[in-house]
């Protein structure tokens, strides 16, 4: 980046207008950039689902408009979908619900399907004939450059039910930046190229994760042995490797209140899982867990609420069963073997309770379960192989995050005109 560009960026961020720039309602932008109303570039789509389309879409941060079943593994739409808006490929939708990363809702284009339907709570729109580079606005919306406009007319009080109260008229009267068409196309192509880099790296990571999954399967079942180990694996009760841990305490700085999330493990509660405001007793005790403890939830074991604590000291709900791993087992290997499908299915046989969602698998029953497990030296050798694969994936993920940060930086510089494509 040249000293001249750095000086310009510093001036704009300080609220000063550098040479060749002007102040607009949207911000300080190049003099040859236009400022238009949303309705000048887009027209509303109010096409009702009269054809009985069942491809119900939702907005995802990563995938944009995607089928609800693919994203949630279920459909949360009403039975009667005739009132839903029917969208065609290339059209856009605005979801007024605020969410993590989208404080003023998300605007996404339909790219993956020829047609789909969305809730009538969405605002749908299509590029007008005079908008000759809608690709530019795909990135413009992704960068959150509409947030300031939406914030100006959104009624904050409506947030109590998670939906911003935004009128259609206000939305279509909002302001948009409109660079010269040639510059829009160049910006869109630069950002699309960066998207392709990100997509390629995501595919490589997915391939590597599948390879690791296959490697885990053959190593953790003994189908492939590491090194020169040839001793047969023995069936042994989990009680030989796990010890029940039931330490109660009030959450503190050393062991804060956390959630145990399926497929993730011990993690900060976040908005979705935080129910602490419902607890009136600030002296309530929770179970303490520490690094490499093994944890499971009786109710949600079959959907992944089981595994190691890889976070550290924390306090979690008393509904979880917690175990410390004995010194004759490698935690990550033991945990992975327990979570093999055949072992999880066997563990589910111990469920007790007549009402779905209120099942209980007693710790004593769980510990009676027998698993096939190698000797401690072979466990360590397996752990080394899998750890090397994890390290490779971690490095690839860090590289991917750098590319995403690069895309974010490019959007902030190019889509606001702080850096011109011909510089």
Image (spheres, rainbow, N blue to C red):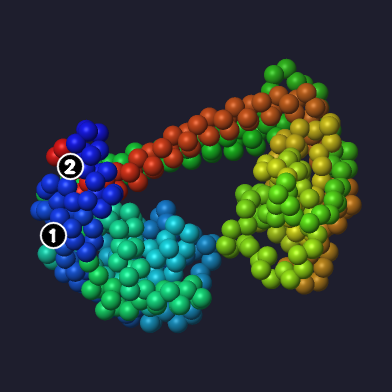
Q: Which residue is mark 1?
A: 34
Left of 416 or right of it: where is 313? right
Helix, strand or loop under label 2: loop
Picture coordinates of residue 340, whole percent (x, y): 70, 44
Task: Name, please, the residue furthest toward the top.
Answer: 228
Q: Does 380 sit above or below residue 109?
A: above
Label 1 near label 2: C-beta < 8 Å? no
Picture coordinates of residue 123, whole percent (x, y): 33, 73
Helix, strand or loop under label 1: strand
Judging depth in this view, the residue of 83 and 190 nearest the camera is: 190
Picture coordinates of residue 307, whole percent (x, y): 71, 46
Picture coordinates of residue 203, whole percent (x, y): 43, 40
Left of 101 or right of it: where is 240? right
Q: Which mark is residue 268?
A: none
Question: Which image quarter is the N terminus in?
Answer: top left
Residue at 21 percent across and 43 percent down: it is 8
Left of 249 or right of it: where is 66? left
Q: Which residue is mark 2?
A: 421
Q: Residues within 10 Å of mark 1 (few under 14, many from 20)?
A: few
For residue 343, say whether it is visible.
no
Question: Which image quarter is the C terminus in?
Answer: top left
Residue at 24 percent across and 49 percent down: it is 12
Does label 2 or label 1 sit earlier along the sequence?
Answer: 1
Q: Residues within 10 Å of mark 2 (few under 14, many from 20)?
A: some
Residue at 11 percent across and 53 percent down: it is 31
Q: CA distance from mark 2 to mark 1?
A: 17 Å
């Amino acid at each position: 980046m040249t000293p001249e560009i750095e000086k310009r960026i510093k001036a704009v961020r300080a609220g000063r207008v550098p040479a060749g720039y002007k102040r607009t309602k949207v911000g300080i932008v190049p003099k040859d950039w236009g400022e238009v109303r949303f309705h000048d570039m887009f027209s509303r789509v109010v096409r009702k689902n009269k054809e009985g389309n069942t491809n119900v879409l939702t907005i995802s941060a990563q995938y944009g408009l995607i089928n609800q079943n693919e994203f949630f593994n279920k459909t949360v739409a009403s039975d009667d979908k005739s009132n839903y808006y029917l969208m065609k490929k290339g059209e856009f939708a605005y979801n007024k619900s605020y969410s993590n990363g989208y404080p003023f809702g998300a605007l996404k284009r339909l790219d993956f399907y020829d047609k789909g339907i969305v809730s009538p709570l969405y605002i749908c729109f299509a590029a007008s004939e005079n908008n000759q580079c809608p690709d530019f606005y795909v990135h413009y919306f992704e960068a959150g450059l509409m947030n300031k406009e939406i914030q100006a007319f959104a009624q904050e009080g409506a947030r109590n039910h998670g939906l911003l109260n935004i009128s259609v008229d206000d939305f279509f009267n909002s302001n948009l930046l409109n660079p010269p068409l040639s510059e829009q196309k160049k910006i869109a192509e630069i950002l699309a190229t960066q998207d392709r880099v990100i997509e390629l790296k995501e595919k490589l990571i997915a391939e590597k994760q599948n390879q690791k999954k296959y490697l885990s399967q053959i190593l953790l079942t003994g189908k492939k042995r590491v090194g020169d180990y040839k001793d047969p694996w023995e069936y042994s009760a989990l009680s030989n490797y796990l010890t029940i841990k039931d330490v109660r305490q009030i959450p503190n700085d050393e062991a804060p209140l956390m959630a145990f999330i399926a497929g993730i493990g011990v993690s900060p509660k976040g908005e979705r899982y935080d129910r602490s405001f419902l607890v009136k007793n600030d002296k309530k005790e929770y179970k303490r867990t520490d690094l490499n403890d093994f944890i499971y939830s009786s109710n949600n074991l079959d959907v992944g609420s089981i595994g190691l604590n890889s976070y550290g000291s924390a306090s979690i709900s008393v509904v979880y069963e917690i175990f410390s791993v004995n010194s004759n087992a490698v935690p990550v290997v033991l945990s992975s073997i327990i979570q093999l499908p055949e072992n999880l299915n066997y563990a589910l046989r111990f469920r007790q309770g007549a009402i779905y969602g209120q099942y209980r698998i007693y710790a004593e029953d769980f510990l009676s379960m027998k698993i096939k497990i190698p000797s401690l030296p072979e466990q360590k050798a397996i752990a080394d192989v899998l750890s090397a694969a994890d390290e490779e994936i971690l490095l690839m993920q860090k590289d991917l995050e750098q590319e995403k940060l690069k895309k974010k930086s490019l959007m902030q510089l190019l889509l606001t005109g702080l850096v011109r494509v011909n510089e």
